[in-house]
Amino acid sequence: MDRSSSDRAPPWLGPAVALAAIVTPVVNFLKSSPFPLGVFPAALLGAYLLYLGVRYFESWAGRGATGGGGPKPAPWSEAPTGPDGTPLAPVTSPVGIAGLASRAPTPRWPAPGSSPGVTVVPNPTRAQERTGTPRAAARLWTAGGEASFEGGWKRETVSIVPPTGGLFGRNLMIAFGVIALALLAFHTYIFFALDRIVAGAGRIVYWPLDWPGLIQDPGLRRQLPDYIFLLYLAVMLAFTFASGLFTNPRFARTQRRDALLILGAYLLTEVTVDIFFFSVSDRFTNSSFLLMRGAIGGLYFSLLIFSLLALPPALNLKRVLPRDRPAITEFLAVVAISLVIAVAILFAMFRFVGIGRELVPFAVLLLAPLLALTIWGFIGRILYDIQLASRPLPSLDTYHPSVTIIIPAYNEGENIRGAVESADAACALYPGSVEILVSNDGSTDATSEVARAAIARLQHATGGVVDLPHGGKSNALNGGLAVARGEIIVRLDGDTRLSAARGFGALVRHFADPEVGAVQGLILPLQQDGWTRKLRFLEIAWNHLFLRRGMMVMRCAQVVDGSFCAFRRQDMLALGGWVAWNGEDTEVTLRLQRLGYRTRFETQAAAFEDVPADLDRLRSQRIRWNRGGIIAHRRHLTGLFGDAFEYGGLAILFWFTLFVRGGVRSLIWVYAAFATAFLGLPTLLHVAVIAGFLLVPRGIVLGYYLVKFHRWQWLPYISIWPVTGTMKQYFTMESFGTLLPGSAAEYAE
């Protein structure tokens, strides 16, 4: 009997039954799996999102200065480079002092971009800025005569008036206070919602098993470290409001988009961390997640900062020296060893000392990075000595190339005589020929006249005075470089004095090694009275005497300080001189390292620098330094993605790690006070105890150098080091306000 079509089975039924017969036992098997299978797709998704984030960061790192729909930031001056970003070839026959003073007709410096070499960047008058008419740029005075010559100028001129932190720091503090109070007031509801999201995500990740995490009852009293999430959320929101991200038309739409993406990624990352954080019961292991939470907050806050500031274009460079791949392994190995030892010390404190419930996580969060950095510094110092012993240097008797000491000066009429005389006295210790150039950056006082008188009285060197229009310290340095004759350039600030006992010769010896591109000498405070001078010595002891040699041997040095340092003249000419903005010493250090050159630190050559005597001058100096450091490191972020990660990439990675670690030190005290008042937690006492712990490893280092340099009476100043660190971090926050879209690109010091 025939069946109607309606009685027939659909064609897909058979395959569906077969598929169900196969899938059902598979699903049943997966449900009985003793392993959390959901973690695999979650891990794949997380890895893909991380990949997208890294690629986006790489793309952003290679882009130019950020700007918005309104007036663009002032353009950034670039050092001369080839089409592929590599430095131009060195000038083979630079004009020296004697040749310039006697040559006719008068030579000209090349116009920017027209040929290799160095160009001075004076400020044009308004009429010249409109017409593009060059002006007579400089005059060189020597004992044998005087010559004038013209130089080009760039439209990327610097401002004579330095920017200040303005109201940004104050606005940031107010915004942070309001937002932090609001988040703390509603913390119960925030944590309730967050915990439910974490629980839902945890069930997905641990499928088919039950998520082992425990949701905390909103009514339960939490520990202070649980509020680290709210701290970083508050500071990131405060930064967006204080910067005017959503109200200032100078910000681009892409910047607003990036800020929202960063905030969203931060929340997603926090949820991911809490999935595993809530499932760990061991107190010490549990505390390690707090260290991760602090690092994550600092990372995303740093990314937010970089996405909103107007910064210079990235610089692509190709190495000129062979690769040094073992440097990467050495750096990572020392970091790993330092972290393991630091955690072992903290575990011993936890197990045998029995520090309190609140102090365990705080110790891990705050003390672990400092302990690891201290151990890293000790290991680095040993490696530096080993490397130096394996590359012995000749004595000055056998290696003493000619030297030019360039002293940039702007309104240094009171100091320039002392700088020249100290340099001349140091020349008596050097067996080679030396010339001293005072590069007068358009001073409005008697700097030029005083310098000429001092040069005329030289006993151990020859010299001259280069008078330039005012254009900033880089302008003065490049003007001196253009006429220098020495094979080695020693840079000395106009308010700095060379040591008559140690001189500069020990710097020069390092250049017998062809891989060395820059050397820093020992820099000490010129004055010893006043709290700023004493604290500056402590800073030098930690950053210069203790950490810097480790940073140099592992190719992650941040700066060869411009107060007293040395370079090869041919290298500086090949690089195009110093960039026309403040922070030029940091920038040129990173540029040399990206080419493959090593840096060195020499304590047998010494100079004494002028240190600000009051808080206002100190604030101005630190805003300038922080601004320059951010500018320089942003310019060289591409070192992370170059063809030789060890050349520049390690330096950027190390700086970024310290930048993240610095985090919100200037705001954490305010936050701790709020938490104490609103939550009833004995926060301030715990923070004070941890501050005492923090002083131990750093205090040992600082105390050693205070005694070594016969300043043992300054030992009590170690106790206020955390306060000064917080103060400097606040100045860093203020410096961000000078780099928002619409700010001047750079200014003359």
Image (cartoon, helix red, strand yellow):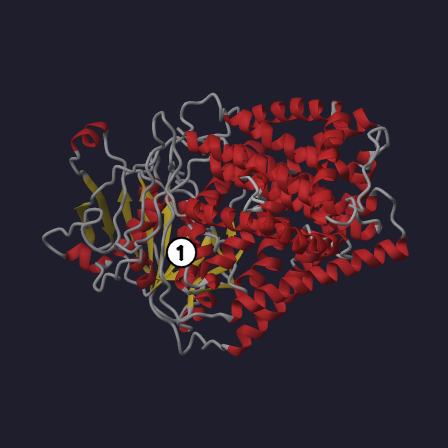
The residue sitting at 47% across, 70% down in the picture is 324
Q: Is residue 143 left or right of residue 158?
A: left
Against 749, is 673 above or below? above
Rendering coords of residue 306 (x, y %): 49, 39
Q: Residue beneath label 1, please?
A: 591
Rendering coords of residue 725 (x, y %): 65, 42
Q: Is residue 636 left or right of residue 137?
A: right
Question: The N terminus appears in which quarter of the rendering?
Answer: top right
* Label 1: few (<14), some (14–19) or many (≥20) C-alpha neighbours in 10 Å: many
Residue type, numbered disc 1: Arg
Q: Is residue 596 left or right of residue 354?
A: left
SS assignment at label 1:
helix
The residue sitting at 79% across, 55% down in the picture is 346
Against 196, is 147 above or below? below
Quadrant of the rendered structure where residue 595 is?
Answer: bottom left
Against 400, is 12 above or below? above
- Residue placed furthest toward the front: 1
